[in-house]
Image (cartoon, rainbow, N blue to C red):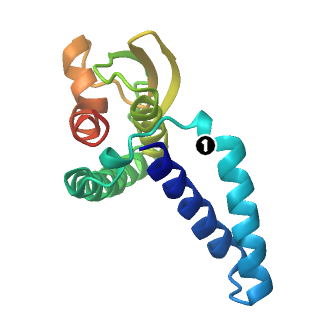
Amino acid sequence: MKLLNKLFYFLICFATWLLLTYNLSWQNLAAGVIVAFITTLVFSRYFNIDIMKVLSPVRWFWMIVYIIYFTWQCVKANFDVAYRVLHPAMPVKPGIVRVRLTLKGSMARTILANSITMTPGTISVDIIDNILYVHWIYVRSLDHDRYAYYISGKFERILKKIFE
């Protein structure tokens, strides 16, 4: 299994090299093989990714669902922020809200926090233990569970299907 992991890392490194250089000359291909090989030897021990999980079609399906859902949420949030900025009364009620996370993995938590930050009107401030602190442009409710659902509800459910 270790050999399969190293081969996977090598292929990812080599593909990244090709995408960055965008050159298929034999010199560039040889340099890419050498760089990918050295990178794999030096850094592959720091990556403990299960290759079978990465290649699972179910996870890829949920990743596509996540991208579509995230894009839709960004479009809606853009219109919401534009409304608030253009409205004469400027209806904002900012605040920091605490969202209790159920995601276990650090990668899933990071993607959730970054997705929230990239959605207009919200900024992830910090993650401490199982609590994500988010600055929100309009706090809709004082009920902890309700605003946690507004901010991360479906994001978190889909990310669980991808990463856990």
Where is residue 24, by image quadrant? Answer: bottom right
Q: Check the image and report above or below for 133 versus 10.
A: above
Query: As rendered, which of 91 and 2 lies closer to the eye?
Result: 2
What's the amino acid at mark 1? Ser
Q: How many marks?
A: 1
Where 152 sits versus 87, above or below?
above
Q: Residue at x 38, y 34 (%)?
A: 91
**Crowding near pointer 1: few (<14 within 10 Å), some, many (20+)?**
some
Q: Position of residue 156 (x, y in %)?
A: 27, 33
Quarter of the image where the N terminus is located: top left
Residue 160 lies left or right of residue 81; in this view the side is left
In the rendered image, which quarter is residue 105 located in?
top left
Is residue 156 positioned above or below 34 on the image? above
Please provide percent x and percent y for residue 17: 67, 69
Secondary element at tag 1: helix
Residue 94, position in %: x, y? 44, 24
Position of the C terminus, as image quadrant, is: top left
Q: Would residue 73 appear left or right of 106 to someone viewing this image?
A: left
Residue in the picture at 71% in, 85% down: 23
Residue 52 lies, with reference to residue 138, above or below; the image says: below
The residue under label 1 is 44
Residue 74 x %, y %? 37, 52
**Between 111 and 20, the one nearer to me in the picture:** 20
Q: Look at 48% across and 48% down and name the residue there.
A: 5
Most extreme residue toward the bottom is: 25
